[in-house]
Amino acid sequence: MWKIKGIAASAGIAIGEIMHMQEAVHDFCRQVDASQTPAEKERFYSAQQAAEKELEILQERTAATMGEQQAEVFAAHKLMVTDPSFVEVVLNHLDNQASAEAAVEDAANEIAAMFAGLDSEYMQERAADIKDIGKRLVRILQGGTAEVNYTGILAAQDLLPSDTAALDLNCVSGFITALGGKTSHSSILARAAGIPAVVGVGSALEKLKNGDTVVVDGHVGEVLVNPEEDVLSDYRLRIKNEQERAALLASVGHLPSETTDGHHIELACNIGTPGDMEKVIAAGAEGVGLFRTEFLFLDKTSVPTEEEQVESYKAVLAAMPDKKIVIRTLDAGGDKQLPFIGGLPEANPALGLRAIRLCMVYQDVFKTQLRALLRASVAGNLHIMFPMIATVDELLNAKALLKEAAEELTQEGVPFKSDVAVGIMVEVPAAAAIADILAEEVDFFSIGTNDLVQYTMAADRMNEHVAYLSDYFQPPVVRLIGNVAKAAKKAGKWVGMCGEMAGDPLATPLLVGLGLTELSMNGRAVPVVKHRIRQLDIKQTEKWADDILGLRTAADIKKRLEEIASAYEI
Ligand code: PEP
Ligand code: MG
């Protein structure tokens, strides 16, 4: 057995035999006599019409099988086939005595190369679209049909949208491609169709032979080639478990997240970009519990403008206008350095100028974000959340700046909601210790266990040598969560969690029992946690939580939670 590493593009596991996709043979004359140019132009125009018809059929078929959204790519292709700038390049080649096939292929390659050279992943992916159009036109010009019949694990250089749409997806169990990234159409379509896919394996693709047995592990982006029987049977068992689990979870997807005695626990998602909202809705979540806005800043060379930010925040709010959307202000510094602010050498960056501390130094950047957030508030139910709060003063200073931003907008006559909820992340033990005091100043708390564990246990979350301490089931962490929940309840404020612990179904009975009423996690965890919640009784969880608060070690707590979990279906 040997392994190929790639990009995990579509989750799931598939076992099957490799079948390489045949690339079209480009066996055509490239140059024609000048007298033939008018006829070649006619051939191009009729191929263009045929392509439009094909794309219309593909659009309808994909809409019916995979939904309108997946079909949009073909509507875009239809526009690109007749796009004047594409046609102009084709006609130039034709005027230079190229055959219709050569003119189309060269034009598509030139435009694709231009897209590929642009500094945007989105535009680079569009290079695949224009190449796809070129391939389609060449095939039509050569009299080829669109039908393909592939079975098993399909290996291809790249799966262009029309390739995937022409496949019988019931016969293909997995995809492996040499090119492509998470946002390429092949990955998007694979995810939509629920087909495990590993993309971007590069030249390793050529080492795969037709008939090789492979395991495509779309969870981790790995392909196991010709594995031994014991490995295969392990993966067969995993597939069986996944299928059983998927069937069960599909049945809870859009049911309410309610305990058996009718208590509603709000399940939300953590997101990094507005593009993630599609997944939030598909997961059956009720909103966003953490939008990590630093991702809007991380791949930039300068601070995103107020306008750019307003657009991003509005896009998230408008995707679920009546649901709670918690947007966290910039959490830069530490392990998320931005090139344009901070970046001073620090001996202990995690204990240094991070998050709210950095924002209070770069107040112009912070104010711009606060203005953008307030301006976007008109689009939905915005909750603003400050990260890394450790003292009341930090919170009051941040709130004062928010008030200043609001006053500026009022003076400028810019509309915004005046009753936006304001909360903090509890991720520093200092905040957990004074939760009762902070509760007087906030509308809500959201516990960030990733940092709360790091700071409580004095164990760097990136350092594998102290990973044994980085455990949210450590009693001091559990007790701090209990403290925060108690303080919030007393003050009549809600408390949620957006650290990784929130998405761990083992922790669900404990968190519900401690009094958390909102849990925010990645989309995949939502149905799992919801399924757990739907089997819980609040009074019972409160007893369990009380009992767990008295346990001595993380191992004891996990053991107790495993006993509790063993009573559930999954
Ligand atoms: C946390 O610390 O738990 C958290 C959610 O924030 P981040 O992981 O972005 O630091
Ligand atoms: Mg954090």
Image (tube, rainbow, N blue to C red):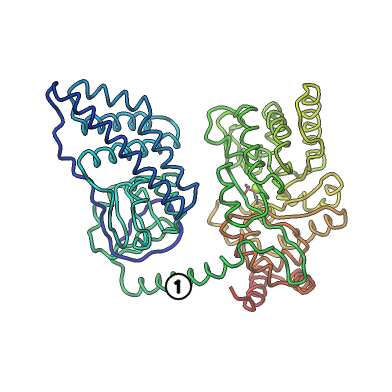
Please state, as top left, top right, bottom left or bottom right, where the C terminus lies in the image: bottom right
Q: Is residue 44 above or below residue 57?
A: above
Residue 557 percent across, percent down from the top left: 67, 71
Residue drawn at x 35%, y 28% is 114
Q: Nearer the viewer, residue 457 or 379?
A: 379
- The secondary element bearing badge 1 is classed as helix
Residue 96 percent across, percent down from the top left: 20, 21
Mark 1 residue CB less than 8 A from any atom of ligand 1: no
Which residue is labeled 1 in the image?
A: 240
Residue 374 percent across, percent down from the top left: 73, 33
> Which amino acid, by three-letter code, is at mark 1?
Lys
Residue 85 appears anywhere in the view: yes
Q: Residue furthest left?
A: 33
Q: Nearer the viewer, residue 417 or 549?
A: 417
Residue 518 percent across, percent down from the top left: 72, 57
Q: How many marks?
A: 1
Please state, as top left, top right, bottom left or bottom right, where the N terminus lies in the image: bottom left
